[in-house]
Amino acid sequence: MMEETQIAHRVERLLEAPIGQAGYRLLEVQFRHEGRWVLRLIVDRESGISMESLTDVNELAGRLLDVEDPIPQAYSLEVSSPGLFRPLREIKHFRQSVGKWAVFTLAPDAPNAPKTRGGRKKRQLRGVIRGVDGETVQLEYEGKRISLAKDEIQEAKLDPDL
């Protein structure tokens, strides 16, 4: 698992700038064994992702990976969009999602969780991400601003109004 994480970080460092210069954001790099080794790049851009966009990024990444050869074993390259309801796993994902609606599941012991009328902590919140300060996510929830440390967030994903 450690080697997989190291390879993913190495690939991210290699590809983030060139993909950014092409007008896309590299959101996540996954390298895992799924019956075969798969290198998965999750990309996005402000105007959205089309099949043509995914093909362009695949070709760009493929050329760079062929030249730099950062992965010792054979693998398949996959490039995909994050989808409308994409998970927010890293603090950079929250930064990229400022101004967007999201659903949060909070850790049971989250000290900043809002309380119900009965005084119990709410674990499910839906609100607008208003900012990120270090490792703290600023969320607008029911008209109030809430600060949630990254470790208080058990799970989060975008939840756009459709």
Image: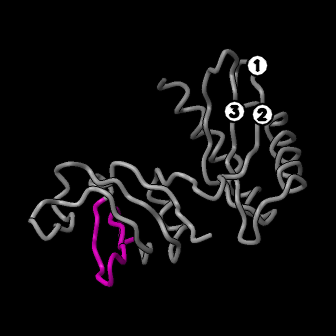
Q: Residue shown at 36%/78% (left/top)?
A: 140
**Badge 3 density bin: few <14, some 14–19, many ≥20, Cα 10 Å:** many
Distance CA(mark 3)–CA(mark 2):
5 Å
Asked if the residues shown at circle 3 and circle 2 are in contact, with their CB atoms under 8 angstroms apart, the answer is: yes
Q: Position of residue 1 (x, y in %)?
A: 48, 23
Q: Which residue was labeled with disc 3?
A: 39
Helix, strand or loop status at disc 1 = loop
Q: Position of residue 116 (x, y in %)?
A: 17, 67
Q: Which quadrant would residue 114 be assigned to in this image?
A: bottom left
Circle number at residue 74: 1
Is residue 138 one of those drawn in magenta?
A: yes
Single out the residue that lies furthest toward the left: 119
**Badge 1 density bin: few <14, some 14–19, many ≥20, Cα 10 Å:** few
The residues colored magenta run 132-149
Q: Mark 2 or mark 3, which is nearer the start of the sequence?
A: 3
Helix, strand or loop status at disc 3 = strand
Q: Position of residue 61 (x, y in %)?
A: 80, 44
Is 138 on the left-hand or right-hand side of 64? left
Pick the residue in front: 149 or 13. 149
Q: Which kind of residue does numbered mark 3 sit on?
A: Leu
Q: Residue shown at 84%/58% (left/top)?
A: 50
Q: Residue shown at 84%/33% (left/top)?
A: 66
Foreground mark, 3 or 1, reads 3
Is residue 143 one of those drawn in magenta?
A: yes
Type of secondary structure dominating the magenta stretch? strand
Q: Mark 1 or mark 3, which is nearer the start of the sequence?
A: 3
Q: Residue shown at 33%/57% (left/top)?
A: 150
Q: Which residue was labeled with disc 2?
A: 77
Foreground mark, 1 or 2, reads 2
Is 100 on the left-hand or right-hand side of 19? left
